[in-house]
Image (spheres, grey):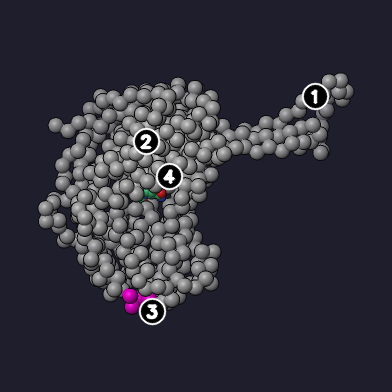
Amino acid sequence: MSHSVPLYLDGEFVESQAPRSIPNINPATQLTLANVPCTTPTEIDSAIQSAVKAYNDWRDVPVPERARLLMKFCQLLKSHQDDIAETLSQETGKIFADAKGDVWRGIEVVEHACNIPSLIMGETVENVARDIDTSSYLQPLGVCAGITPFNFPAMIPLWMFPLALACGNTFVLKPSEQDPLTPIQIAEIFHEAGFPKGVLQIIHGDGEQVEHLITHKDIKAISFVGSARVGQHIYRTGTDHLKRVQCMTGAKNHMVIMPDADKNQVISHLVGSSVGAAGQRCMAISVAVFVGESSQWLDDLKNAMSQVKPGLWNEEDAGFGPLISSTARERVLGLIDQGKQEGADCLLDGSDFQHPDYPEGNWIGPTLFANVKPEMSLYREEIFGPVLLAVQVNSLEEALELINNNPYGNGTSLFTNSGGAARYFQRNVLVGQVGINVPIPVPLPFFSFTGWRHSFYGDQHAYGKQAIRFYTETKTVISRWFHHGEEVQGPNLTIQMR
Ligand code: NAD
């Protein structure tokens, strides 16, 4: 019988008393790895209460001490990187090298959080008026909550709680119900690093548990990563309850290919960025916009894509793994069918791909459509599968118009050898993360992850300096110290001009 994924409550790993659970399924074999309990309301309340209690002490732990604990956590994560990646591969289907990348990108955020003494510095101006000084401090908010998606079960939880904790908050995490074993393994390492009990809590479940969390009176801030549909709901509900909310959401990322670009670079980067991780990355390239004569490269692109084979996480020649669930596979197959019906040219069709040893896996092979039009459902919806759409346009201006009319603004990329084209593109495109000859422009953690438009709801983005602002409140102190024997001026009844 499969075991129940433990909760992490008040510094202990405990079994939930929940009557309802969701199976955590290996997407290649369909074997149940564990049961994910849908945490009861009492358990959620007790997680939050324990986080409130832990906050009272944690906020007073000196900043360098908090940094030292994070350094220990970071060092342990590095030494367990392969073990975590193996768990991650089992429950997501990601190939091992990609799973290691998922863990590594999270570790880099923890490294960034170790710089908290410099990151949390306030500002000071001496003598803003005669004998008066002003300082601002960044103080923690209290208990923060995080809700994470299935596609980066190591990296995205690590975008959130290490920085929130570094700032002096405590944290309740609700990871994706589709792959919670990776975040629990990370919590075991966190536990080993010696943090005080209660500063991090992990509960499990789906929308029902999220609802309880985001409406709870003691939750001060909510970080969410997931689809735009759920993100909109969380943003509205959270702000209605007067909480601070940041939602990193869905995407439709375009790569524009100018005729002067290096063809071999274009093809190699397009293949990797579209079908890598089975296209289940929020920064995956899902639309290739060929400008002018560059569309002649479509045949070479098709040939290169057809060389990539899905496979098991530890198979040497596997390019990517299965989709996360049979539901996700059915959805993507439905969109592929609709694309054919709506008149797009399917140049390469991965719908029938089956792994010879694991025919029940959620496989879809690399798929390429040409002559895609903006009104087609293939173009309008986020596909989240190994499907690349090719659109042909006549000019860079036309490419820009297409991208700027798309509701999403997470990432985009331009391949060119022209500095002028690159500058025009980066200045005028309404997308928050732009790559110039870089297909997936994900910033390192000392910058922030800056999606725009329907790819983000909120004000302050994930990680970088913006996360420090998100997880803190600014307090401004204006002070004056009197010298001995100073003359008392009498009450002042007007606003003073300085
Ligand atoms: P999802 O929105 O289905 O789920 C995300 C989280 O929300 C999960 O923890 C889930 O349990 C919870 N949830 C699901 N339905 C809910 C509801 N009705 N009410 C409240 N909570 C609910 O997303 P997913 O399928 O796990 O992840 C893929 C999506 O995440 C894609 O859209 C992708 O673009 C997006 N994503 C965005 C970024 C980014 O930084 N912008 C990064 C990674 C993934």
Q: Secondary structure at mark 1?
A: loop
* Mark positioned earlier in the residue sequence (4 or 2): 2
Q: Residue at x 35, y 44 (%)?
A: 103
Q: Secondary structure at mark 3?
A: helix
**In which quadrant is the N terminus drawn?**
top left
Which is in the foreground here, disc 4 or disc 3? 4
Name the amino acid, label 4.
Glu
Residue 482 numbered tag: 1
Label 3 sits on residue: 293
* Mark positioned earlier in the residue sequence (1 or 3): 3
Label 1 and label 4: CA atoms lie apart by 48 Å
Asked whether 341 or 3 is in front, the reply is 3
Label 3 and label 2: CA atoms lie apart by 51 Å
Q: Secondary structure at mark 2?
A: helix
Q: Secondary structure at mark 4?
A: helix
Label 4 and label 2: CA atoms lie apart by 13 Å
Label 4 sits on residue: 108
Label 1: few (<14), some (14–19) or many (≥20) C-alpha neighbours in 10 Å: few
Secondary structure predominantly adopted by residues drawn in magenta: helix
Label 2 sits on residue: 76
| Highlighted magenta segment, given as a residue range | 292-297
Please determine whether, in this image, residue 213 is positioned above or below residue 387: above
Q: Which x, y percent locates residue 451?
A: 46, 52
Please determine whether, in this image, residue 52 is positioned above or below residue 446: above
* Mark positioned earlier in the residue sequence (4 or 3): 4
Left or right of 437 in this view: 428: right
Q: Which x, y percent locates residue 124?
A: 68, 37
Tell me, yes or no, if residue 132 can be seen here. Answer: yes
